[in-house]
């Protein structure tokens, strides 16, 4: 039951994710595609130090519930304030503040999940959480679809987002409980160190006995993992930030149909989390190889989207929907895997570093995608994003060796 609040919160942000760019560029606000890029990039970039700060403070105080409640209550107020203005500068300020408040609950949530089960169950637990919240995101998209059809105005949609976060706050206040003992991450780190030492001793003994060494004694590169995360996030945000505008303007789809397309992406993610939940058995280094493969797959799927630029037809629209569903499926596998790996690699007090790395890539991509689209067209957005996904694949390949 303690996850109910996160489910309600994701409903709000699923609705907001597609509504906001359409709202800013749709006439209610005097905004452009570049304004969307600046707004989201600035918000994501300024939230980066707070991701680290919230993670440090939550680990330092071990009052994880406090930061979850702080996040949801702040979002309730800020989203309500969103309804009171249509000035792009004021909206940008509010959106930056929303981003800072939003990341307050992320490190605490990751720690609560990691400390609720043993290391072998982490990937399954993260997949279960992401499945639940992805269902919330999907319901939020469906709400946006039906509200667009019914002609609800922007203020009504924003009020609903605010109310959902209020419900998330109340639910978390009732059901979330701080763990009595914090030790699972420490045990996982100790186990990883001992396994590394054991491999070194085994190889040394084989070498002294004159045996041929088929294994390589090499420690995992934390820097390669961090670089891969940043690049993957950069590629994702470069593609997805202007994508609703592409569907709306270039493919001439109604807002309700844009919401419908994104429900396919979210539906694909739900299937991915469900599969991970039932099949994940994170043994040895399998999770490392999975992240590498998914980065490659996302790059190829992004490249396939270029056909929707070259040939705008019913068939290419359908293909774009299928590609988005496949991307959602792949991202689900990726996120559950990398979250569990990060909880193993990152020491106590650095729980917010995962969100810092993801936000760093997202901050650049949120600006890069709209700028490329506005100046060179969406074809260049798809190609650039695909290349960055492939660079992420190379970084994960270095880490997973």
Image (tube, rainbow, N blue to C red):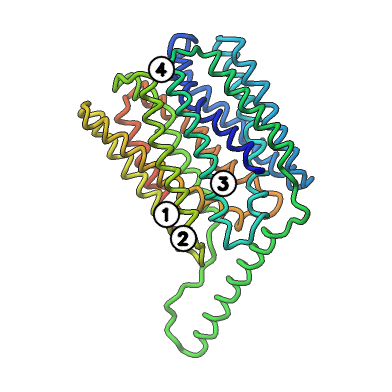
- Quick check: 206 above or below 364? below
Question: Percent x, y for residue 199?
Answer: 55, 75
Residue 400 numbered tag? 2
Earlier residue among tags 2 and 4? 4
Q: Which residue is mark 4?
A: 149
Q: Which residue is mark 1?
A: 292
- Depth check: 136 or 373 in front? 136
**Residue 95 appears in which quarter of the rendering?**
top right
Question: Percent x, y for residue 63?
Answer: 77, 44
Q: Are the residues flagged by discs 2 and 1 in contact, CB closer than 8 Å?
A: yes
How crowded is the residue under tag 2: few (<14 C-alpha within 10 Å), some, or many (20+)? Answer: many
Taking the spot 66% from the left edge, 66% from the top edge, the residue there is 190
Q: Are the residues flagged by discs 3 and 1 in contact, CB closer than 8 Å?
A: no
- Depth check: 4 or 70 in front? 4
Q: Are the residues flagged by discs 3 and 2 in contact, CB closer than 8 Å?
A: no
Question: Alpha carbon of mark 2 to alpha carbon of mark 4: how far?
Answer: 47 Å
Q: Which residue is mark 3?
A: 129
Q: Are the residues flagged by discs 2 and 4 in contact, CB closer than 8 Å?
A: no
Taking the spot 30% from the left edge, 39% from the top edge, the residue there is 303
- Give the foreground label among 2 and 4: 4
Question: Alpha carbon of mark 3 to alpha carbon of mark 1: how far?
Answer: 22 Å
Taking the spot 47% from the left edge, 30% from the top edge, the residue there is 366
Q: Is residue 286 left or right of residue 257?
A: right
Residue 358 numbered tag? none
How crowded is the residue under tag 4: few (<14 C-alpha within 10 Å), some, or many (20+)? Answer: few
- Quick check: 99 above or below 175? above
- Secondary structure at badge 4 equals helix
Earlier residue among tags 4 and 3? 3
**Residue 171 appears in which quarter of the rendering?**
top right
């Amino acid at each position: 039951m303690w996850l109910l609040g996160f489910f309600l919160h994701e409903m709000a942000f699923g609705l907001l994710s597609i509504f906001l760019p359409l709202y800013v560029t749709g006439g209610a606000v005097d905004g452009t595609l570049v304004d969307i890029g600046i707004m989201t990039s600035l918000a994501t970039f300024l939230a980066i130090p707070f991701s680290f700060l919230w993670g440090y403070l939550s680990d330092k105080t071990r009052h994880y519930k406090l930061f979850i409640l702080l996040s949801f209550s702040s979002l309730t107020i800020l989203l309500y304030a969103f309804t009171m203005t249509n000035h792009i500068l004021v909206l940008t300020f509010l959106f930056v503040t929303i981003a800072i408040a939003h990341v307050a609950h992320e490190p605490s949530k990751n720690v609560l999940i990691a400390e609720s089960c043993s290391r072998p169950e982490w990937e399954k637990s993260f997949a279960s959480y992401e499945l639940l919240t992805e269902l919330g995101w999907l319901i939020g998209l469906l709400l946006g679809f039906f509200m667009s059809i019914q002609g609800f105005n922007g203020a009504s949609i924003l009020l609903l987002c605010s109310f959902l976060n209020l419900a998330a706050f109340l639910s978390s206040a009732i059901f979330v409980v701080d763990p009595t003992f914090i030790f699972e991450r420490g045990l996982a780190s100790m186990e990883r160190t001992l396994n590394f030492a054991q491999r070194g001793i085994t190889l040394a003994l084989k070498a002294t006995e004159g045996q041929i060494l088929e294994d390589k004694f090499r420690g995992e590169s934390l820097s390669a993992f961090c670089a891969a995360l940043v690049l993957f996030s950069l590629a994702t945000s470069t593609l997805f930030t202007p994508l609703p505008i592409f569907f709306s303007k270039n493919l001439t789809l109604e807002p309700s149909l844009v919401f419908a397309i994104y429900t396919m992406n979210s539906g694909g993610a739900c299937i991915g989390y469900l599969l991970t939940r039932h099949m994940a058995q994170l043994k040895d280094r399998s999770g490392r190889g999975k992240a590498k493969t998914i980065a490659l797959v996302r790059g190829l799927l992004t490249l396939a989207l270029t056909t929707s630029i070259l040939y705008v037809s019913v068939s290419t629209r359908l293909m774009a929907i299928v590609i988005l569903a496949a991307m959602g499926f792949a991202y689900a596998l990726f996120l559950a895997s990398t979250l569990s790996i990060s909880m193993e690699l990152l020491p106590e007090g650095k729980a917010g570093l995962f969100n810092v790395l993801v936000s760093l890539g997202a901050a650049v991509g949120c600006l890069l995608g709209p700028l490329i689209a506005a100046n060179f067209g969406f074809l260049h957005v798809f190609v650039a994003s695909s290349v960055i996904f492939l660079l992420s694949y190379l970084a994960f390949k270095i880490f997973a060796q």
